[in-house]
Image (spheres, coloured by chain):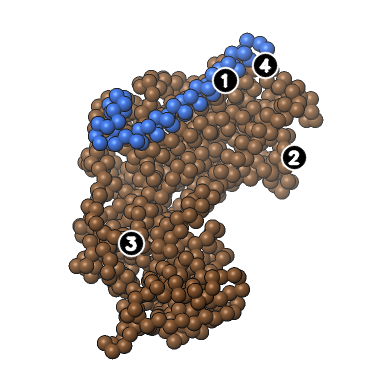
Chain colours: A blue, B brown
Amino acid sequence: MDRDTIVGLILISATIIFNTSIIIYSRNLIERISRMKNPTALDIQKGNHDRKK
Amino acid sequence: MTGKSDTQLKTELSRDLNLFHITMMGLGMMIGAGVFLGIGNSIHIAGPGGVLLTFTLNGALALFTAMSYAELSSAVPRAGGAYNFARIAYGGGTSFMAGWMEWFASSVAGSMYAITFSIYTMRYLWQLDLLNWIPLQYTDLSIKIMALLIALFFIYINYMGASETGKIGAIMTLGQTAFMVFIGLLGIVVAIRDPSRLENFKPFMPNGWSKLLVTMGFTYVAFEGYEVIAQTGDETIEPRKNLPKAMLYSVYIVSLTYVSVAFAAVVSVKAGSPGVIGAPWEWIGQFREKGFGEAIGRLIPAGNFLLTLAVIFASTSALNATIYSATRTSYALGRDGMLPHIFSRISRKRKTPWAALLFTSSIVLTIALFLPTIHVASSASIMFLFLFFIVNLSVIKIRYNMSEELVYGYLSPLFPLFPILAIVSQVILAIFLIHMSIIAWIVAPSWIIGGIIVYNIYSKSHAKPVESEIQVLEEERAPEGEEEIRVMIPIANPDNALSLVGNTLKLCRNKKARIKLLHMVQVPDQVPLTDAGKYMTEGKEGIIEAMLYLRPRFPITTTLRYCRNIARGIVSAVKEKKIDLLIMGWQGKREDSRFNLGGIVDPVVDRTPSNVVVFKNCGNRKFHKVLVPLFGDRNDLFAVEVAQALVEPGDINSRAIMTLLYLHGERKRPDPSQYIKSILSHISPEIEVRTKITRGKEKKRIILNASRYFDLVVLSTKERFKGRVGMMTIAEAVIRECEKPVALVKSSSRIISWTKKLI
């Protein structure tokens, strides 16, 4: 395999892994936020679940 | 979201799109033309490895912007998309430019879908030797004419106010996605069985790495589906949760699908096979936008036919979606005073924004007719890149300025890294598109300059002041009481309102009930639900009349609900409000012969998780003699309960009469006398009960004959697994033919409802 192929394949694999991680992370975050009551951005960043309950 | 009309009625929007529906809407918009046109061109420009990298890296780039959209949509879940976000972040001028660009981007995308449809359909017809009579020099012209015809057809469809329903659209998109996934998997299988085809990837980047930026910019339009998801903010169930999920899922699914399909396209052609001259990637690339079709034709025996079919479905559904999305945007600009008032005009007959559609159509048709395909696709991409640039700026501004005011359902991680990466990469891709199409770089900035002029000359002085967006986020809840049951009455017209009210009073006589009066207002897809106030007409009258009669007896909530489909809207309202009993009227007419009782009653009876009573010809009469056919199932008890509430004595000296007609079929049923005895224990001693057991196959005829001697027939119908089209219960057959007043009842079955939901 030439250099372009190796770099290309690494880039493709890394991007797919990165995208998958973002999706899994985002899904978990959305589920976590959905259990919070009216969370603002600051509440979520602080992980403050009960602030407005 | 709520608002109040001048009659103190509460108005609300019907939320009936779930995560699946909106994900499919996003996918439907994406798997349109970008990929079909893009693969051949990308192979030609960037080579076999370049096409894989194009779609992989574009997937990541699209994900960056999707995260911004997801965050903003979760915080401001209402229709409007980029226009709405820019309005909150920067106000007047920027929001106008976002709307102005979105209008053009969607219109140009519509032109592109029409051309894609035309290219692939004509190509297939030529292969079948059906178009040989067209002289060679008129090939391009014939493609343009075909594109115009299909665009005109969908403009007409949009004018008529019709569009695919959520479910049909979702199923079609599912089919397209499945087909693309199938092609991708087939490519992998072919490569495993014949590893020599992997040699097609040599050289991996024959034209250098810089070409990658050109192809990424060119195919970016194939990832723009999250804009249409953002538009559904007012209609989605749990929008804070479902909108961001749908945006991220659709981009992820589509990027994996595109990469696998691009892989399949490259390995589909075997080097040295008949007709293939030179390296396979060069052979595919020479066909440019038709390259994908030529490649897949070599992969599957019936590939050409299947691919043409897929392109027809994909491009037409995307064409339809873009026309109505562009119409909606220009309509919203007109409504807000940013474009002349004519843009917000609604057709009285069709209820569609005809002027906005007319102006949108002129853009779609002009671009489709006069611009070559590659420039159309480049113009669409460049405009979407500019639009997403504004959205990524908006997410940063809104997060920094309003993080303590807005309620979020999702936050982009490592903020503001991804919006900044998206902005930088979008600028680079837009610049590199100049290598693909100089015309696109003339058309798109010209449109933007035109927008700046229109804003300064007209919009700035005419724009209506905007209300605070945050107020929209507040939810209005009716105070909860200690009622036993929650009853909902959908009222369609004032004529049957009083009869429904009279019968409701009887049914709820001795109960602590809370009554919810509902009027559904059907709004065409082309108009955002938030603007549905224009359609509120006769429903108000009926609902106010009903309110006057019921208010002294029960706590009343009155609601005008905007929806796309009345049946879905009623079912969604029943679920949201956790209704125990739904009371409806049926006038005995079917407008659609596919349904047993009509396009509203059938789906509502079938899908509502509550108990349902449907009155036919009941008026405000008194019922002294009631017939209750028993079928030996759990619905019988509910039928008897309803009959008991409706029947009343003729005078002081007589008693109300209820006749239980047990229909003993051939199938094994409970012992009739024991069964009737158990039913009798639930009936008040003040009612005179007569029982009759009959045997026979012609149950419908037996009930119809017996009904002649009664004032009212109370029939129970069943809930079932399948849709109602083509199937009819005995109760439905009777209610259609019975000349006496009938009450059709169905008791809820949580188990079946859950099973149906799962299926």
| Labels 4 and 1 touching (C-beta < 8 A) | no
Amino acid on which the number 3 mark rests in the picture: Met
| Residue on which disc 1 sits | A13
Amino acid on which the number 4 mark rests in the picture: Pro
Which chain is indicated by disc 1? Answer: A
Disc 3/disc 2 C-alpha distance (Å): 56 Å
| Residue on which disc 4 sits | B203
| Residue on which disc 2 sits | B301
For the question of whether residue B108 can be seen, the reply is: no
Which chain is indicated by disc 4? Answer: B
Circle 3 or circle 4, nearest the eye: 3
Query: In this rendering, would B437 be left or right of B228?
Result: right
Disc 2/disc 4 C-alpha distance (Å): 28 Å
Closer-to-camera residue (B719/B466): B719
Q: Residue at x 54, y 73 (%)?
A: B671
Tag 1 secondary structure: helix
